[in-house]
Image (cartoon, helix red, strand yellow):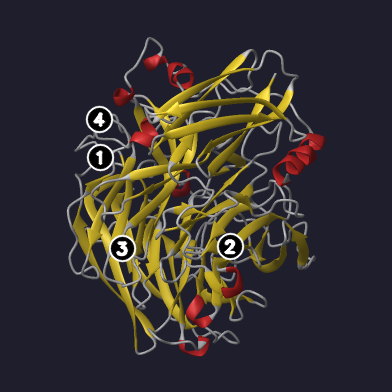
Amino acid sequence: MKKILLIVLVFGIGFSAYSQELIKRSTKAPNTELQPEKAPQNPATAMDADTPERKTLKANGRNVEYIPIGKSGNAYGFYGNARTYVWADPNVNSIVFTHRMTGGVEVDGNSRIAYDVSTDGGSTWTNDVVVYTPTEPGPQYPENAGRYPQGAIINPEGNTNPDNAYYTYLAAAINNTNGIWGAYAYGSNVLTETDPSNPTQNLLLSGDGYLRLIPDALTVTKQGVSWYIEPSSDFSSGTESVYTGEIIVGKGEIVDGEIVYEESLMELLEEGDSFNDSKIAFGPDGLTGYMLFMSDSESDPQPYTNYHPILVKTTDGGNTWGDPIHVLLGSTDGIESIKNYWPDEVIESIELYSNGFDRDEVYYNMGYHADIIVDINGNPHLTGIIALADNDGWYPNDPAMATWHLYSEDGGTTWEADALYDNLFFEGTFGDITMYNRPYAASTYDGHYLFFSWIDTDLDGAETNTNPNIFVIGYDAEDNTYNETGVENVTELSIYWFSAFYGSMSQYVFSELDEPNSVYDCEIPFVFTEFTVPANDTEEMNFYYVDGFTLKMPVGVDTHEGLAGFAVSQNSPNPAVHSTSINVTSEKAGVITLSLTNMLGQVVQTQSVDNSALAHTFNVDVSNLDSGIYFYTIEIGNKSITKKMIVK
């Protein structure tokens, strides 16, 4: 009933039946983050004198507070890619959020790096703790101006006192030695030493094969070891980065109260190959870890797969790393649930397949961004958008894309995948910058429960992803099941419904056992942005922490309603005019039931089939239905998936 109420409210805002032509995009992510931002703005902004207030709301049975934390001078440094901006450490009940500062063009302006910190689980905060300042004024930007900062907590193993933990940051720095880029800024501060702070400040420059741009990957193990990685790339042209054939790998630890890094170069693929994203994560033991790269691997092309995940694995805490593991999306060796997800009609709408196709010969692309988490058993779990593609492009459009969960239960040898959500929009643009879907993967500290989040605009009548909500789903890595309520909208019915810009999730979440009800209450830290001037990327940004959003994860439950075990496509065509089709693929044989309901919850049509082939397409006649919004539910055994359909 909750979903029906939600749609009724949205319907009141405005509804129009929609259909979207599939638009081909380059599989290579735009390099807008590598280009200089607009000239720094004056410090004064439209809301500069206003102090944001805490906002409390009870929605969907949760008491959620939206707590204002720090500010930044503009949206640059936070847009585009999902990085390690917010970090929670359950052992010290603390959270940090890393961002640029406010201000003008000088060294005391928005090229500084700061963090916000809470040591009581997110209830109260100390904001704008400055940890990095450019070294001197410059002609356009200060010398070694900080950009795209990331941050985390380094906590000595076994420590539960925040006073004994450390904050650490990593940022790109503008020093014009590799295009406009060329340096990393990094350092550390005692986590609670905030008034005044006493951070270390270091610079790593380009040279000797280390060509630095903007690192996307930063993590810290439970054992207190910090890691970052980035493909070493030449940006001297100022327009295009060229990969050198080596990965920059940094490993850091706290030594005598300061973060100290050791760097190395690791060969991977070949010079000139392209990368869209990179991430790194370790399991709870700190020994098993994976580097994740999104690459087209042009030097080692994979069949019917464009940009795809490539993993490099360690089992000895990063002392040695294995050979590349290509996660194939298409071809005979691809993942069956992906290859059978989209209906024939959607695939045939792409020119390459218009005259017929073999599902083993359909291309897929995963990008531009992805994330990785490692579970309690040392197995990798990936998330991001996968879309239909052809041999030289992809189609990140509704209904040809979805957010997926890719996982291996044997350490990366074989792979399975579940479709989590049929995305409506891939991107939204504000001024000169673009916001994508920002996929994140998180876990409880023991790696038992996993969480996947993304942003999308589900407002009927919207044309792009410019009114985003944060969506999240939980997964039990031991039982291979999802939370009973399925995908949840974090900002639903709140003041920030349709305005949770640049939503970001922590790598770790808080969890507490509710023994009488046999569930773990998992509180998930989120941060998002508020524009002070609507949709203006050059003005000040307010950051909000979401306090109190929890998912209940059952203890010791073998099966419950969720997404695991089968996949359901979006109906096609959508909107449906006379008829529409729905494709279902399942891991096990059994009876599949389709129920179609209207917005009042009344069942208007049902179908059932004995699924012995593990794949079935329902053809639904809608010619006698009124125009409007309907919901179709697919049930197999005690599991169900519900999706929205529009009848024109």
Residue identifier under label 3: 378
- Which of these two is toward me, 545 or 574? 574
Q: Secondary structure at mark 4?
A: loop
Residue displayed at 77% across by 65% down: 56
Can you say whether 402 is above or below 278 in the image?
A: above
Of the two numbered discs 4 and 2 in the rendering, the one whose residue sits closer to the viewer? 2
Residue 83 visible in image: no
- Which of these two is toward me, 515 or 133? 515
Q: Which mark is residue 332?
A: 4
- Which of these two is toward me, 269 or 306? 306
Q: Amino acid at mark 2?
A: Lys
Residue displayed at 48% across by 87% down: 160
Of the two numbered discs 2 and 3 in the rendering, the one whose residue sits closer to the viewer? 2
Of the two numbered discs 1 and 2 in the rendering, the one whose residue sits closer to the viewer? 2
Q: Amino acid at mark 4?
A: Thr
Label 2 Cα crowd, 10 Å radius (few <14 / some 14-19 / many 20+) = many
Image spot of residue 486 (x, y percent): 57, 49
Q: Secondary structure at mark 3?
A: loop
Q: CA distance from mark 3 to mark 4?
A: 27 Å
